[in-house]
Amino acid sequence: MRDESLIDELNERHGLDGIRFDSGQGGLPKAVLTSRHGTAEIYLHGGHVTHYQPSDGEPVLWMSDEAVFDGNKAIRGGIPVVFPWFGPHQTDKGQPQHGFARNATWKVDSTASGDELAIVLSLASTLATKRIWPHDFKLKLSTTLAQSLEVSLTIQNTGDKHFEVSPALHTYFVVGDIRKTSITGFEDAHFVDQLADEQRQQRGSITFGEEVDRIYFAGAKPGNPVRPAVIMDDTLGRRIEISSEGSQSSVVWNPWIDKSKRMSDFPDDGYLTMVCVETANAADDSRMIEPGKTHTMTQSIHVVSQDAQKG
Ligand code: TA6
């Protein structure tokens, strides 16, 4: 249901040249960013970036045709915000997979307009969240549309005791055909194969012929900086360069055939045109945040079309 008064208030308070608010799917409020660099959309539900398209290219973020926009379920696609924990809750299986932030309604903190467009959304702890996870926190999600799309998640401990988090920016990318797609940047990196529950080492680029669910750890050779991951998409004739900061782990996931069929909000053949490359603080890369301190993780997404590569 369209909430005209909320949309009007958001445009009144935060609308700027190139940034406006509208009712999106399911009547959920969203921000629409439009500039010479391209377009992006961010829903207040989940603080969820759902769309990014450079002005000279095709959509970059994959969105399920069967995604549910009812304000109760996490949106399937785009950039789900995983917080406070990655994966299943460690002790209470009744708690939501990947935490509760992607199912919460975020607030608009600020917007900024110019050659770069930016919007900051926030989510703070409540009595309800503290019943699930007994800590005081404030999250800020900053999205900047320029030559690249940059998304930063800042986690502030507003309480009086430290807490440990394993957040992620769980980004779904469009590919032309996963069977003809490879991902470079993880050569020689160690990873946890989530399906076999074993540690392995990457040989060469990542290719796809079955379900892949892996947590890669940076620094293939100790001390190496986190190298950008690059999705090499010959079908669409482009590379997607994914840079991370504040993160030493990346998750690569494609559900393949059987898992696609098991997800009600995921088309059976959806696996063919998507891959997740997630900037994370997962597993051993979880972060301890002391009272009053903050931690920021950033994912930058830059598309290079093969035409451009030919010069
Ligand atoms: O990031 C990979 C993963 O942990 C997979 O195991 C799969 O569960 C995926 O996340 C999607 O999780 P979701 O809770 O969004 O269905």
Image (spheres, grey):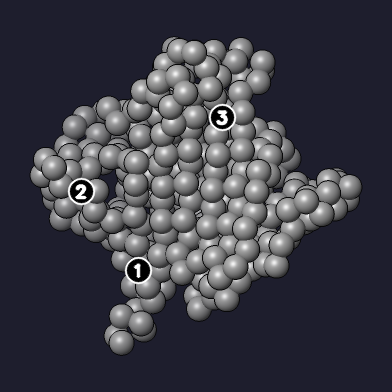
Amino acid at pointer 3: Lys
Earlier sequence position, callout 3 versus callout 2: 3
Mark 3–mark 2 Cα distance, whole angstroms, equals 28 Å
Which residue shows up at 40% across the image and 29% down it? 166
Residue behind mark 1: 239
Percent coordinates x, y for residue 108 in the rendering: 68, 44
Residue 106's tag is none
Looking at the rendered structure, the secondary structure element under dot 2 is loop
Q: Quadrant of the C terminus?
A: bottom left
Which residue shows up at 61% across the image and 38% down it? 122
Looking at the rendered structure, the secondary structure element under dot 1 is strand
- Horizontal side of 109 relative to 29 (left or right) equals left
Amino acid at pointer 2: Pro
Which residue shows up at 34% across the image and 79% down it? 306
Amino acid at pointer 1: Arg
Residue behind mark 2: 225
Looking at the rendered structure, the secondary structure element under dot 3 is strand
Percent coordinates x, y for residue 98 in the rendering: 49, 30
Residue behind mark 3: 138
Mark 1–mark 2 Cα distance, whole angstroms, equals 21 Å
